[in-house]
Image (cartoon, rainbow, N blue to C red):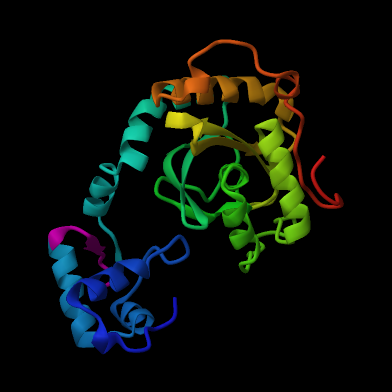
Amino acid sequence: MTALAEPHRLTSAQRVLSILGVFDTENLALSLSEISRRTGLSLSTTHRLLNELRRWGALTRHDDGRYTIGLRILELGTLAPEGGQLREIALPHLHDLQHATRANIHLGVPEGHDVIYVESLRARDTVPVPSRLGGRWPMHATGTGLVLLAHSSQEFQEEVLASELRGYTVHTMTEPGPLRRFLAEVRRSGVAIVESQLTYDVMAVAVPIRGARDRVVAAVGITLPSGSAAPRTLVPAMTTAARSISRALGAPSAGTTRPLPAGRRQAREVTYAAGRQGPR
């Protein structure tokens, strides 16, 4: 995050928010001087605000002098209807899904161009992944994010595609043309399967969760080592979990047990990996 051009014009609230805003997945712990430099605030102002945030519980100061986000922020985050209520409804189904797949489970919601994980269940003896509860990642780089992006408006998709898309591995989809075709196929099939998008040798499978009026409000995804399972064998358990969560959220299409269309029963595999020109 670059320093603010005119920090003296910020209100007190804006100064506090600018401090909280410098923390992200790549900057989980920061020193006083780092926070001052990133916000453009003076050392004295930064020190004063850090102490206030620490006393309130928004930040924690460690023995090495660096600061991390405090538990008070996590507590507030669970009150958000997009996160806390969804998480409470989804958690039993996510545990069932983890038991069935023995994979890492992620529940993501959209936030701007990113996906935020409001729940993340780690499986034993499986591939380590950087995702975590409260983690934020660009939509184009994760299975859950791609599902959310695929079911967003055409205008929003083009807005994301026109932005600078970071490549986390050599396989991350960053080219608008192939990514646009991939999103269309995900929307048609109802499932995204990607490999090595965020981390090498990791396969991600994700499906949408619908709320009132059948709008896609979240996505559930799993991650496991590439080649450890055939993606099509995982999709039934995932769609069952997603349908159960959607039904609890009041999605009209989830209130019936009628069979899925043939295309979705077959769960056509949508993948993107090295050497491929697009989804298949």
State left or right for residue 133 relative to residue 183: left
Looking at this view, is 82 or 226 the one in front? 82
Total numbered labels placed on residues in the image: 0
State left or right for residue 123 relative to residue 44: right
Q: Is residue 152 magenta?
A: no
Q: Quadrant of residue 259?
A: top right
Q: Residue at x 58, y 25 (%)?
A: 238
Looking at this view, is 151 or 83 the one in front? 151
Q: Quadrant of residue 60?
A: bottom left
State left or right for residue 125 relative to residue 270: left
State left or right for residue 111 relative to residue 179: left
Q: Position of residue 183 (x, y in %)?
A: 69, 46
Give the vertical position of 178 relative to 222 (above or below): below
Q: Position of residue 111 (x, y in %)?
A: 45, 53
Q: Residue at x 49, y 35 (%)?
A: 215
**Dividing the image into 4 quarters, which one contains the N terminus?**
bottom left
Give the vertical position of 164 relative to 187 (above or below): below
The region drawn magenta spans 56-65
Query: Can you see residue 66?
Result: no
Query: Can you see residue 21?
Result: yes
Q: Residue at x 67, y 51 (%)?
A: 197
Q: Is residue 61 magenta?
A: yes
Q: Position of residue 269 (x, y in %)?
A: 76, 33
Looking at this view, is 89 or 37 the one in front? 89
Q: Position of residue 102 (x, y in %)?
A: 57, 26
Q: Residue at x 58, y 35 (%)?
A: 222
Q: Quadrant of residue 117?
A: top left
Give the vertical position of 253 relative to 203 (above or below): above
**Dividing the image into 4 quarters, which one contains the C terminus?**
top right
Secondary structure predominantly adopted by residues drawn in magenta = loop
